[in-house]
Amino acid sequence: MPSEPQKPAPEPILAVDPVDQAPRIPLTSLLRTRLIILVGLAIVPVAGLVCLRAWMDHQDSRQQVIESLNRFVSQAPKEHHRTLESARQLLSTVAQMERWRSPTNRPYNLAFLSNLLALHETYVDLGAVDSQGRVISSARGLQPGTVLSNASWFQKAQVEQGLCLGDIRPGGSVRRPMLEVAFPILDKTNGSFQGAIYGALDLGWIRSLPSDSTLPGYASIAAVDNQHRLVLQHPTPDQSSSASAYGASFGWDQAVWKISGDGIHERRDSAGIDRLYAFATLVGDENDPELRVAVSLPASAAFAAARQTLWLNMGLLLLATLCSCLLAWIGADRTFLRNIRPLLRVARELHQGNTAARTGLAHQGGELQQLAAAVDEMAESLEKRVAERQQTEGRLRSLNRDLEQRIAERTVELERSNRELEEFAYAASHDLQEPLRMISGHLQLLERRYKDQLGDDAREYIHFAVDGAQRMDQLILDLLAYSRVSTQSQPAVKVDLDESLALAQSNLTLRIQEANAHLTSERMPAAMGDKLQLALVFQNLIGNAIKFRKPGTSPRIEITCVPAPENPGAFWRVEVRDNGIGIDKEHFDRIFQIFQRLHTREEHPGTGIGLAICKRIVERHGGRIWVESTPGEVTSFFFTLPKASKDA
């Protein structure tokens, strides 16, 4: 009995390897990172509240600034009106005095006006002129007789009977800004114009408006006349700076004064700074003002307190966030990861086959301890199952060895029985041929010698007996051919299929000529097999195509060879196609069985073993054979053969 080949020992199911290092986890997948992200997400609403609070503070600051500007806008005209009303009362009172009508009082008028100027600080100058505009007396030293008839206030006083407003004089680096006013001196009897009392009101009171209206200290105030001349500006510009440079530094440029209408306006100045402006008309109409006063506030400074509060809150929030993240990073390690790492270690060791791994954590406590208990129980259960499986596999391997040994013994015995059976069949077939030839020969001899003495029935019986013996002899020959497929086969070698096909055509030359058959074939490749047996396959298939041809039609047989579609790299697929009578689909499997016939011997002679031999040869070569047919039109037999290797 042949010895059983040794097989490599199976690998052990358990492979306990130490866990050296945990696999590197991306930073974004760390539990601590995710906890920090959660902390950040929790702080987002707080940051939103801080931003909302900052926005509300910004709006409150804006509202406070606008309210201050509105107070200024409403306060400046009132203050100006009070100043004008005071001037009207004073000048009207002075204008009614008789001293201005008598030339003898002129030496005393100068002292009177000087005393009035000292008592009323809102005036820069006080004086009187006659009906021709000549100066009668002036507290600031104008010479008597100086003609002021071109002054706008004098021209207004000639036609008006109330307070007359004159020109506005800007204040330079030394002079103060002034508004000229006058009141006419009228004759008491007929009301004719006899002169005017004039004065110059100091506009410096405008500088006190920011503090009076609770405007921020960084507010800038300016007054401008109808010619866009800067009458007054506060804070006072540096002595080395020009008025225009000062105006630009506080947002006072020509474009600002082109803004029409009183009230609050927001725009960007020529320096690119966003500013809030509050306008008020002091003299003239709002749409055509002669004197306007305005306050300028840089928006950034106006809202500086709100921004400072915002940055302070954001800084505190950032500090709280960093502290929370640090606590989350440290706390996650001490609270969660210290208990999770043993679980990961056990999971990796179980993956590597170490079912004896345990977490070593307490089984009482929170969720992580309960998880550790579940993992340890799972590992223990897995260890028991692995041990049971190893025992079962050991028994199965023992049974497999016994079964393989029995199969090997049965295979050897079966091969020996098959060889003996094939040898017996060959010997029996060979030995049976001789008695059959003797029976057939003596019956034929009996028929020739006693032909005249035998009746018709006896000759017919002899004919039947001879025919049966001959058919029995042919059947024995076919059985011998069928058995020789295995007993007399040659080892597979590289075979040129063209040579096998040529050999088959040579054996069928006479039948091809008698049937006037047309056989065409392509260039055939090389395959692995037995040249003679492959020739027998071609011979049987071509012979069947000739045998089962349609009456009155010449057989046309086409033979092609292509790579097998199901395995083009290893097999060829050969097709033998004819135009014969065809085969019904229900008989496709039956025709490859031994001694199976679809026609009577009178229609088509034969023993029905040819296709069975083809099937046995093709399967011996590792291929398969099948048929496709349309009755009355075409029949194609296919079989596959292994390709010849390059080394064959």
Image (cartoon, helix red, strand yellow):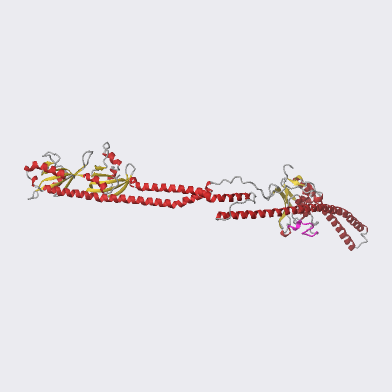
Query: Is residue 644 rendered to the left or right of residue 445?
Result: left
Q: Which residues are magenta?
A: 588-601
Q: Main secondary structure of the magenta part?
A: loop
Image coordinates for residue 547, horizontal then vertical, percent: 77, 55
Image coordinates for residue 469, horizontal then vertical, percent: 87, 57
Q: Residue furthest top?
A: 240
Q: How many marks?
A: 0
Image coordinates for residue 517, horizontal then vertical, percent: 75, 51
Residue in view at x 81 percent, y 56 percent: 607
Q: Examine the rendering and report whether any part of residue 428 can be seen.
A: yes
Residue in view at x 88 percent, y 61 percent: 461
Q: Is residue 551 magenta?
A: no
Query: Is residue 555 rendered to the left or right of residue 187?
Result: right
Q: Which residue is nearer to you in this view: 245 or 43?
A: 43
Q: Which residue is nearer to you in this view: 343 or 166?
A: 343
Q: Which residue is nearer to you in this view: 6 or 572?
A: 6
**Which image quadrant: the C terminus?**
top right
Q: Examine the rendering and report whether any part of residue 554 can be seen.
A: no
Q: Is residue 599 magenta?
A: yes
Residue in view at x 17 percent, y 49 percent: 86
